[in-house]
Image (tube, rainbow, N blue to C red):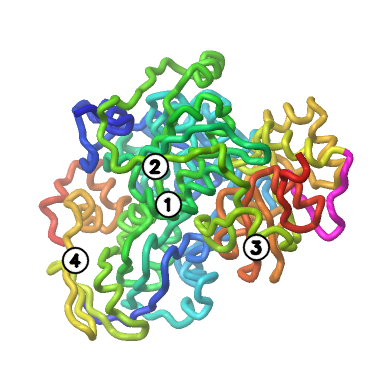
Amino acid sequence: MNKGKVWKYGDNVNTDVIFPGKYTYVLMEPEEMAKHALEDLDPSFAAQVKTGDVIVAGRNFGCGSSREQAASCLKYAGVQAVIAVSFARIFFRNAINQGLPVVQSEKAVRNISAGEEVEVDFERGQIKAEKGTFKFPALPDSVLSILKAGGLIEHTKLFIRNVDIDDMSF
Amino acid sequence: MGATFSEKVLGAKAWKKVKAGEVVTVSPDFILSHDNTAAISLKFAQLGVDKVKCPDKIIIILDHVVPASTEKYSQNHKIIREFVEKQGISNFFDIHNGICHQVLSESGFAMPGKLILGADSHTTSYGAFGAFSAGIGRSEVASIWATDEIWLRVPDTIKIEMKGSFAKGTFAKDAILKIIGEQGADRANYKALEFCGSAVKDLTLASRLVFANMAAEMGAKNGYFAPDSRAMDFLRQHARADFKPVFSDPDAEYEAVLKYDLSILEPQVACPHTVDNIKPITEVEGLKFHQGLIGTCTNGRFEDLKVAADILRDKKIHPAVRVLILPASRKEFLKALREGIIEVLAEAGCVILNAGCGPCLGAHQGILAPGETALSTANRNFQGRMGSRDSKIFLASPATVAASAIAGEITDPRKYL
C-alpha cells in the first residue's frame, strides 16, 4: 500500500456533512459525486484531496442516513481507507459494499495527527504512522470476500455465476 | 438460556437456532426503497439479471422529492415508474401517498415477526408493530432483488423499560430524545432496542412509531415493541398477510437494561448539530428561530397534528416565524382534514404541505438560508441538513413547536396546555 496523507476529523461525522441530502436523489456521475465529498464538514477537502489519502476520525463515523454515496463519494475522491474509533452500522456496510476499506482502531486514531503520512497494510492488518505501528484485527471472512470481489455488486455477479469467491486472491 | 426477539426472527429465517454475534444469510419478507429506486435499478442492471427474483416482496414508495421539484427529480421518478412497469411490481406507491415509513405501516406490510429491510435509515420504524426492520444500502437492495438473500449479523439487544405515564406537555418524542441524550447517538450501534415496561400498553401505535423511528438515532439496527392487543386490533383490519407474533423469552440475554420513568419527564429539545445534544426545555427557552416544521415520518401523524392544532386554535403564529405542516401520509392528512385540524393550522398561519420528506432533508420546500434556525419535529438535526451549512436545527415535540410558533421563540408547551 502507498502512503497517504491524513485528513483528521472528530466524532459523529454524519452522512449529511459527508454527502448532502440535496444531491442524494438525483443520478450523479462518480467525478461529480467526488466534488461534493465532505462538503458541509470541510469545504476545502474535495479540492485538495489526493488519491491515496486517508481519513482518520472519532466515534460513530457515517451516522445518519443510509445513503450509499456517503461511502462512494469518498472512494471516488480517492480516499484509500477510513480509520475511525467506530463506524455507524449502515455506513460500515455501505463502505464494504462500495469497496472502501474501513479500519476500526481507537489507538491509531488517538496517535495519528492531521497532515502526517500513514501506510495502511490490510494484508498484515497494520497502520504505520509517525508515532508507531498500530495493529487492527482482520475483517470477518464474509466481509473480506466482498472487498476481495471489489464491492457487493461485483460480489453478487460472481454469486449469480456460482464462482467461489474464497478462492480469489485479494 | 432463552432467545431475544431478534435472535428468534433471524433464527427462523436462517432455519437454525442463532445467538447474538452470529452472521446469518436470510431472505427478507419485504424490501423497501423510495426515490433512490432509480439509482438502485441502475445497480441492478449491472448485475446482468433481467428480472427481479421476487417482485411481490418489493415495495417502492415515492416520497423524498414529491412532486418533483426540478427536471432532474422528475427524470428520476420517470425511471422508477418505468422500472416498476417492466418488473411487474404491484406494491408501488406514487407521489400522492406519503412518507414511506407511514405508508408501509398504514398499508399493513409492517407485521409482527416479518423481516423488512429498506434503503432508508429509518426503516427501524416497523418495530412498532413487532417486525424486525433495518436499514441497508442501495447496492444491498439491488443484490436482494437479484438473489433474494443478504447477510445480517444477529444483534445484541438493549432493553428499555419504561414505566409511568406522560405528564402534561410531554410526549413520546420527549421520551426518546431524553433516552438518546443520556445514552448517546452511538450507544445502540449494531444493536437491537426492545421497548417494554408497564408504560407501553398506554402508548398509541403512532407514539410507538416515534420510538422505533428514532431508534436509528441511537445507532440501532432495529427497535421493537412486543405486539399487544392495541397492535393486534390494528393488524386484524390492515395486515396484508398471515403472520405469527414473535416475543423475547423471559430468560433471554440482554446486553443492558435501561430504566426510564415517563412521569418525571420534562419537554426535551435536541440542540445543533447532533441528536444526542439534548437539553430540557427550561434551558433553551427564549431562543429565537425562523422556521417551524411540524410533521415528517417521526411526528406527522393525526395525533401530532391534533396536539399542534389544540395549541394553535384561535391563535396566530408569531410574525417573525413561518411554520410548515408536513403530514406523514395522505391518510393521516385526510383524518386531520375531516376533523377540522388542517383548517385550524391554516387559520393560524401555517403553510400546509403535501405528505412527503422534502424539507426534513433539505431537498425542497422550505430550505434554510445562512444564519437561519429551524425548530422541527423531525428526527435529525445534522449541520446543513435543512439547507445552508450555516443554519441550525433544534428538534422537539409537535406541542413544543406549536407553542414556540406562537411566542416566536422556543417556549415550554406546558404554558399553552
* Amino acid bearing label 1: Gln
Q: Are marks 1 and 3 on the same chain?
A: yes
> For residue A129: magenta?
no
* Amino acid bearing label 2: Leu
B47 is higher (above) or lower (below) than A68: above
Question: Residue reaching furthest left?
Answer: A167
Residue under pointer 1: B183
Report the front residue among B145 and B176.
Answer: B176
CA distance separating discs 1 and 4? 27 Å
The reply, left or right, for residue B25 in relation to residue A70 is: left
Residue under pointer 2: B258
> For residue B319: magenta?
yes
The reply, left or right, for residue A70 in relation to residue B385 is: left
Residue under pointer 4: A136
In the rendering, at what x and y percent does residue B21 appear?
22, 43
Q: Which is in the foreground here, disc 2 or disc 3? A: 2
In the rendering, at what x and y percent does residue B194 appear?
39, 35
Q: Are marks 4 and 2 on the same chain?
A: no
Q: Which is in the foreground here, disc 4 or disc 2? A: 2
Q: Which residues are magenta?
A: B314-325
Secondary structure type for disc 3? loop
In the rendering, at what x and y percent does residue B192 appear?
36, 40
* Amino acid bearing label 4: Phe
